Image: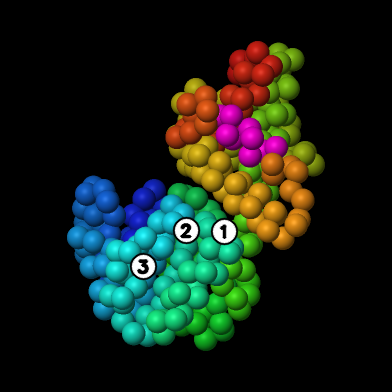
């Protein structure tokens, strides 16, 4: 089975490499030469364009930044037209539900199939092949795409039959993640202001009812001066913006998401947009006039 793959970034490259390991014939495209070289080293093929990556492929995986990039790849760069007539487009980027639904309709109009399949798990999950995948598509389309999805994640959920439903679940996920990171930062900043050692606070909270996955994962990096980037601040500027748009579209209030969004926007305005998202704690430290202990 030939799989075209567009978007060989921090998550996309290990995802494409996992497909190669599972014996798929992978042809990938990215703007960065080093990403293409890494894919070739893993046994995949480098394409000179998105259209070339898609040419005659049975499936096309899009792990791009947003819906606008997905639309550009499919409809402007010609990747959709280059696919085989029965091919499946698998959109795995985080997109607004309405955008995923609109892209699906345009793909279906050409007779090709579409799976709305955003992921959660970050770089660690992408590398290990343990992503959580929230897929929405008609049952037969989902079944046909499942071998590709199983090469990328170990928690595959068929959340609905309509494209856009996968994006909705991912939107809910990002709401929770963004708010959890923000509240963990608030708690850490409050403890630091009182002069309490951050490592002790994390040990206590991590074993209490107040614990969360985000606290355990991001909390230690809030104590580091230059933590490695697993997910950037600007990712949550984008993703929480999607949450707010979805809330407005459905007339569902999302006040906690709105506040968390402003905190990530503030961190980005401080020049931290490309830093690890745990560094939203810097906003609190600036407001409180405190420093990490």
Which class describes the residues within 10 Å of circle 1: few (<14), some (14-19), or many (20+)?
many
List x then y, in percent, for residue 56.
26, 78
What is the spatial separation of the Cα atoms under label 2 and label 3, in whole angstroms?
12 Å
Q: Position of residue 132 (x, y in %)?
A: 55, 61
Which residue is labeled 1 in the image?
Answer: 96
Quarter holding residue 43: bottom left
Residue in front for this viewpoint, 171 or 157 = 171
How many neighbours does mark 3 have within 10 angstroms: few (below 14), some (14-19), or many (20 or more)? some
Tell me the magenta residue range: 259-267
Quadrant housing residue 139 = bottom right
Q: Position of residue 2 (x, y in %)?
A: 29, 76
| Residue position marked by numbered label 2 in the rendering | 67
In the image, is residue 223 above or below residue 68?
A: above
User: Label 3 belongs to which residue?
Assistant: 75
Query: Is residue 117 rendered to the left or right of residue 84?
Result: right
For residue 216, say whether it is visible.
Answer: no
User: 285 and 68: which one is in front?
Assistant: 68
């Amino acid at each position: 089975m030939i799989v075209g793959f567009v978007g060989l970034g921090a998550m996309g490259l290990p995802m494409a490499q996992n497909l190669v390991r599972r014996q798929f014939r992978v042809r990938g495209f990215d703007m960065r030469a080093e990403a293409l070289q890494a894919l070739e080293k893993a046994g995949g093929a480098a394409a000179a364009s998105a259209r070339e990556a898609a040419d005659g492929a049975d499936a096309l995986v899009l792990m791009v930044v947003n819906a606008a990039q997905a639309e550009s790849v499919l409809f402007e760069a010609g990747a959709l037209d280059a696919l085989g007539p029965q091919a499946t487009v698998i959109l795995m980027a985080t997109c607004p539900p309405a955008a995923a639904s609109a892209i699906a309709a345009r793909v279906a109009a050409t007779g090709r199939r579409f799976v709305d399949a955003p992921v959660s798990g970050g770089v660690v999950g992408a590398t290990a092949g343990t992503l959580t995948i929230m897929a929405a598509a008609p049952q037969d389309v989902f079944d046909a795409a499942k071998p590709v999805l199983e090469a990328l994640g170990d928690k595959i959920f068929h959340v609905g039959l309509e494209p856009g439903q996968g994006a909705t679940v991912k939107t809910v996920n990002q709401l929770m993640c963004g708010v959890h990171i923000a509240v963990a930062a608030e708690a850490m900043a409050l403890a630091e202001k009182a002069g309490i050692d951050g490592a002790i606070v994390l040990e206590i909270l991590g074993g209490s009812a107040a614990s969360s996955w985000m606290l355990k994962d991001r909390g230690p990096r809030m104590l580091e001066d230059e933590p490695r980037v697993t997910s950037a601040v600007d990712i949550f500027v984008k993703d929480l913006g999607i949450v707010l748009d979805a809330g407005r579209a459905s007339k569902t209030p999302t006040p906690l998401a709105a506040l968390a969004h402003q905190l990530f926007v503030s961190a980005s305005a401080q020049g931290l947009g490309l830093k690890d998202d745990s560094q939203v704690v810097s906003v609190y430290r600036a407001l409180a006039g405190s420093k990490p202990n």
